[in-house]
Image (spheres, rainbow, N blue to C red):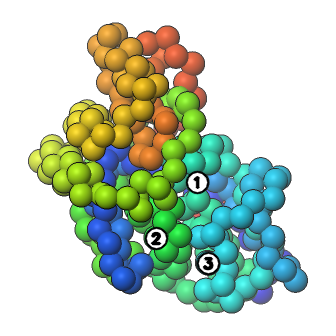
Amino acid sequence: MTDEATAFVPGHITGFFSAHRDDDPTKAGSRGCGVTLTDGVTVTVESAEETELLLDGEPIDVEPVRTVLETLEAAARVEAESDLPLGAGFGVSGAMALGTALAANRVFDRRLSTNELVTVAHGAEVKAGTGLGDVVAQAHGGVPIRLEPGGPQYNELDSIPARARVEYVSFGQLSTAEVLSGDTERLTAAGREALSLVVDEPTLPSLLYASRRFAREAGLLTPRVREALEDVAAVEGHASMAMLGDTVFAFGTGLSDAGYDPTVCATHPAGATLK
């Protein structure tokens, strides 16, 4: 055992997805495509008498993190520092779950493999209804294409071989749990069509095009996102909506050119890592 351990997990923006349910949360998940970010979440875990969770210094209750600790039979103080807002389409809860799994494995000497830890975190996210594909994407890094759902034992991943400057503007939160608990038939049909487009042409422009089309066809566009996409298009730029958040993202300078003051980062070249 060690006193504490720290992991960094990249943020993840999902451009589009289809939902695939299963009674086993490690088999359930999503197909789709998105981008991991150099902005992310740093998670520090240390042994404690009782579990305590903090995000940016404030107490918080994140169900997937508690589930991860229960699965690893560990009581810990978990301190997360995030570059990204919670609930706005950046995979923060998934990052906290995965970072906790990686760091707790070291602190408590659980001796699990990377795939086993990703499975624990992915299953915790699915069970909580807070995400379907963020964890496996964050473990992979880059611009991952999720060809099959589920944890590492069941899924299949590919990626778009590209790096880029990423701009984003977040207007607020959307409830992932509410969307995923509703009727996802329309969403899943749109997600399957979007995935076929990106598989046929695995490029960043194709990802943005398929993502915008998905957001429209799935009926997920918010008024502020719609306005921002129109503003970017007016200056011959390209952008899309982050799933699931009231957030717009673009590659290059699309949002800046449209007069917005975006946060700027880049695609992350690798997956989650222990520091």
Q: Amino acid at mark 1?
A: Val
Residue 232 visible, this orientation: no
On screen, 275 above or below 111? above
- In the picture provided, is 243 more to the left or to the right than 157? right
Q: Position of residue 189 (x, y in %)?
A: 19, 53
Q: Residues within 10 Å of mark 1 (few under 14, many from 20)?
A: many
Q: In this view, which residue lies farthest toward the left?
A: 200
Q: Position of residue 45 (x, y in %)?
A: 75, 70
Q: Residues within 10 Å of mark 2 (few under 14, many from 20)?
A: many
- In the picture provided, is 77 more to the left or to the right than 176? right
Numbered disc in front, either 2 or 1: 2
User: Foreground: 156 or 88?
Assistant: 88
Q: In this view, which residue lies farthest toward the front?
A: 182
Q: Rounded to the nearest whole Å, what is the CA distance between mark 2 and mark 1?
A: 14 Å
Q: Rounded to the nearest whole Å, what is the CA distance between mark 1 and mark 3?
A: 16 Å
Q: Secondary structure at mark 3?
A: helix
Q: Secondary structure at mark 1?
A: helix
Q: Amino acid at mark 3?
A: Thr
Q: Secondary structure at mark 2?
A: helix
Mark number displayed over residue 67: 3
Check disc 1 and report the residue beneath it.
92
What residue appears at the point 50 percent right and 31 percent down from the top-left corner?
A: 168
Q: Earlier in the sequence, mark 1 or mark 3?
A: 3
User: Foreground: 252 or 224?
Assistant: 224
User: Is mark 3 in CB contact (under 8 Å) with mark 2?
Assistant: no
**Image quarter for residue 215?**
top left
Q: Earlier in the sequence, mark 3 or mark 2?
A: 3
Mark number displayed over residue 126: 2
- In the picture provided, is 110 more to the left or to the right than 80? left
Q: Amino acid at mark 2?
A: Val
What residue appears at the point 81 percent right and 70 percent down from the top-left corner?
A: 52
